[in-house]
Amino acid sequence: MSKPVHLDLTHPRLVLASSSPYRRDLLERLQIPFAVEVPSVDESASYGELPSNLARRLARAKALAVADLCPGRFIVGSDQVVDIDGQVVSKPGDFDRACAQLRAVSGKSLCFHTALCVVAPDGGLRERTVDTQVWFRTLDEASIVAYVAQERPYDCAGAFKVERLGITLIEKISSADSTALIGLPLIALVTLSC
């Protein structure tokens, strides 16, 4: 007969290496106790670095930075980099830049590269990247301004929140994991953790 597992909720075995409230909300869906530790990682792209490589490098760097702070636990690091024609699209930060980003993607498609890195208690790494292609409708200026004024997507690359009104801006989405677009691919996480 096996012994029951007792979780010490003051020191959960799972730690999310992220400052993102979106990732925290997604991980809560799994109903597993976890802690959050904000990693100190420079998120600047290296010269000529491809968006998909940047996402993988940052997810790994975040996970490893927190693994040093929380030994003996499972650490989940994730990062998302938005790519339009091979160029990184950053978080807009303010109203004018958000409108400019949406004008730039109107009638086009973006690729959201969402990378995941899990560091096991023994130091082993498991990694996966989930790509999501998003096709935007042709957007008129009034729609862009109204969306940005109401949604304020300043902390979202591409100025777009699929989990809210951003869904009204798009024509279609293609992904193997719908949660990847929000910032943490849960299907991939569960698969890596098995």
Image: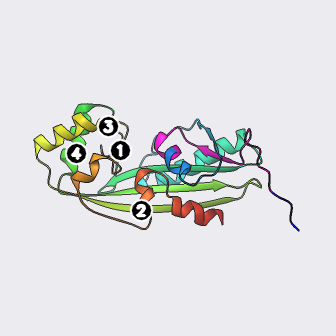
Task: Write the start and end of the magenta stretch as one range.
Answer: 5-24
- Residue corresponding to mark 1: 157
* Alpha carbons under labels 2 and 3: distance apart: 21 Å
Badge 1 density bin: few <14, some 14–19, many ≥20, Cα 10 Å:
many
Please tell me whether mark 1 sits on a helix, a strand or a loop: loop
Please state the horizontal and vertical placement of residue 139, each as a whole percent of the image. 14, 50
3D distance between C-alphas at marks 2 and 1: 15 Å
Which of the 4 image quadrants contains residue 145? Answer: top left
Q: CA distance from mark 4 to mark 2?
A: 20 Å
The answer to which of marks 3 and 1 sits earlier in the sequence is: 3
Q: Which residue is mark 2?
A: 131
**Disc 4 element:** helix
Q: Position of residue 161 (x, y in %)?
A: 33, 47
The type of residue carrying mark 2 is Asp
Query: Mark 3 = which residue?
Result: 92
**Left or right placement of residue 29 versus residue 2 in this view:** left
CA neighbours of label 4 inside 10 A, class few (<14), some (14 to 19), many (20+): many
Q: Which mark is residue 102?
A: 4
- Identify which residue is drawn at 82% across, 58% down: 4
Which SS class for mark 2? strand
